[in-house]
Amino acid sequence: DTAVSQTPKYLVTQMGNDKSIKCEQNLGHDTMYWYKQDSKKFLKIMFSYNNKELIINETVPNRFSPKSPDKAHLNLHINSLELGDSAVYFCASSQGSQGSQKLFFGSGTQLSVL
Amino acid sequence: QQQVKQSPQSLIVQKGGISIINCAYENTAFDYFPWYQQFPGKGPALLIAIRPDVSEKKEGRFTISFNKSAKQFSLHIMDSQPGDSATYFCAASGGNAGKSTFGDGTTLTVKP
């Protein structure tokens, strides 16, 4: 009964390929996020969706395209993968998009681009 | 511009000792200051959080001290245990920021 679940756990692929990561939350939250954690463990927000609407889009290459079919799901599609995309990608959710934010994270997807 | 600065980057403490991690923020609109704990291969998980209307919050061995005038807050882990070995992130959110801002993380190692 994982609160925020993302798949796959590991993703190994070649440069230039296109891949997707899926995320689902069963907490009833209306806001979902994608975070990127690099090799130094820095956590950076990439996108945020509130009730299926994009509200945060940080300076992320447009090869990254999030999609939220409903407020319980947020997927991340990455085109033309590059070596620098190798990182751990975390999905998260919270109740509300403004003010205090208690974030619930998934267990991460480790992406390795070869 | 980094809005939340965290130190130290790494910390080694003996079992039973006190671990202290510090954070400083810039945006005075922040009104929620959580600490997240992350074990290898797992996502960050909320450990403890504080709002600026109190100067201290304690939950078991974990205490947040908050200094609003200095715009600083810190995590104290009393009687540190090897099981506390993890990466700790401070964060801040609030106002109309619309997102949480994280510190760069502190890797804590508690030696038996």
Image (cartoon, rainbow, N blue to C red):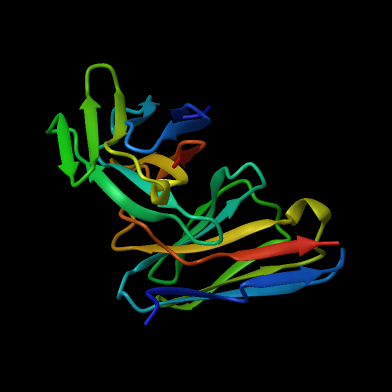
Q: Quadrant of residue B13?
A: top left
**Left or right: B34 in relation to A39:** left
Tell me if residue B99 can be seen: no
Residue A19, given in percent of the width and then of the height, sits at 73, 73
For residue B44, above or below residue B92: below
Q: What's the residue at 66%, 63% (across, down)?
A: A110
Q: Position of residue B48 (x, y in %)?
A: 26, 47
Point 22% across, 28% down: residue? B66
Assign the C terminus of chain A to one quadrant of the image.
bottom right
**Residue at image x 42%, y 47%?**
B82
Residue occupying the point 22% across, 23% down: B68
Q: Tell me: B56 left or right of B103.
A: left
Q: To which quarter of the image does residue B77 belong?
A: top left
Q: In this picture, is A38 found above or below B14?
A: below
Q: Quadrant of the N terminus of chain A?
A: bottom left
Q: Residue B7 at x, y = what percent?
A: 46, 26
| Viewer can see residue B108 | yes
